[in-house]
């Protein structure tokens, strides 16, 4: 039941984006009449996107054939916006892709390049000045939130590494790697000496 609701909301959202951003429809022309299936492994959820050249349809519990099938986790969804990250995710094992890689890159590029002029759309309801003020305020709040998030992450990292000693400091990890390599080299040399003596 909740899958049907989720896919219906996603379908409405995508089609709303098509009306708000005309460039999105142009970017998706190469994906017309092709099916992109997505499986979220950690949620055991499968869905599919089908763009017919005018509207986008989202299907839930999709297990039929698709031109491209992507299997990944929820954590990696944000990285799919960058087409250049697809190959890296596949190599690292975070993403499994079957079928047309170009179709996945096309969707990734299309949604990654979204640049909706919210001020223009809101000006119909708030006027030009009100819409511009609201959009600039939201952007300023978002920038502050990102700065606070970054500072909090740095504080938490320092707290866990330096004060609580919960995680390893990068310098300690680098030192451990260096010592491990040196020990491995010494063991290899010792093994060669033993082999020479036994021969």
Image: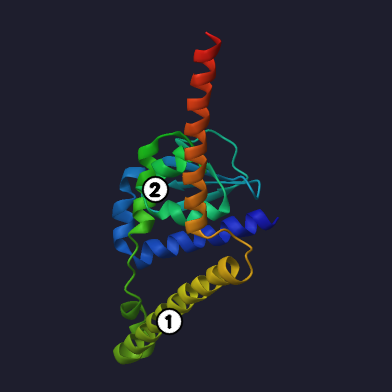
**Residue picked out by circle 1:** 144
Give the spatial CA distance, label 2 vs label 1. Answer: 27 Å
The quadrant of the rendering that contains the N terminus is bottom right
Q: In this picture, is 67 found above or below 10?
A: above
| Colour logic | rainbow
Name the residue furthest right: 1
Residue 190's disc is none
Residue 144 lies, in percent from the top left, at: 43, 81
Q: Is residue 89 left or right of residue 27?
A: right
- The x, y position of residue 139, in whole percent, is 38, 80
**Looking at the image, which residue is at 35% across and 62% down?**
114
Q: Residue furthest top?
A: 199
Tell me which label, 2 or 1, sits earlier in the chain: 2
Residue corresponding to mark 2: 85
Compare residues 65 and 124 and report the one nearer the observer.
65
What residue is at 52 percent from the left and 41 percent from the top? Answer: 180
At x 33%, y 84%, the residue is: 123
Q: Is residue 135 left or right of residue 174?
A: left
- Which secondary structure, mark 2? helix
What residue is rendered at 41% in x and 64% in y? 17
Is disc 1 placed on a helix, strand or loop? helix
Q: Is residue 49 visible?
A: yes
Tags 2 and 1 touching, CB below 8 Å: no
Residue 2 versus residue 98 in the image, above or below: below
Q: Position of residue 93 (x, y in %)?
A: 51, 39
Residue 118 sits above or below residue 66 on the image: below
Q: Nearer the viewer, residue 104 or 1?
A: 104
């Amino acid at each position: 039941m909740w899958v049907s609701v989720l896919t219906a909301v996603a379908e409405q959202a995508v089609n709303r984006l098509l009306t708000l951003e005309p460039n999105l429809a142009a970017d998706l022309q190469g994906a017309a009449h092709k099916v992109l299936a997505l499986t979220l492994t950690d949620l055991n959820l499968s869905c599919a996107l089908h763009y017919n050249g005018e509207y986008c349809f989202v299907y839930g519990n999709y297990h039929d054939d698709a031109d491209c099938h992507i299997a990944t986790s929820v954590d990696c969804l944000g990285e799919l916006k960058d087409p250049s990250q697809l190959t890296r995710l596949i190599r690292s094992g975070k993403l499994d892709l079957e079928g047309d890689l170009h179709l996945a890159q096309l969707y990734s590029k299309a949604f990654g390049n979204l640049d909706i002029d919210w001020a223009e759309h809101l000006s119909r309801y708030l006027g030009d000045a009100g819409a511009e003020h609201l959009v600039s305020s939201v952007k300023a709040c978002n920038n502050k939130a990102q700065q606070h998030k970054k500072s909090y992450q740095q504080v938490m990292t320092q707290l866990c590494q330096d004060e609580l000693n919960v995680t390893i400091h990068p310098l300690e990890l680098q030192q451990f790697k260096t010592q491990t390599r040196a020990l491995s080299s010494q063991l290899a040399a010792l093994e060669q000496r033993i082999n020479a003596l036994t021969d």
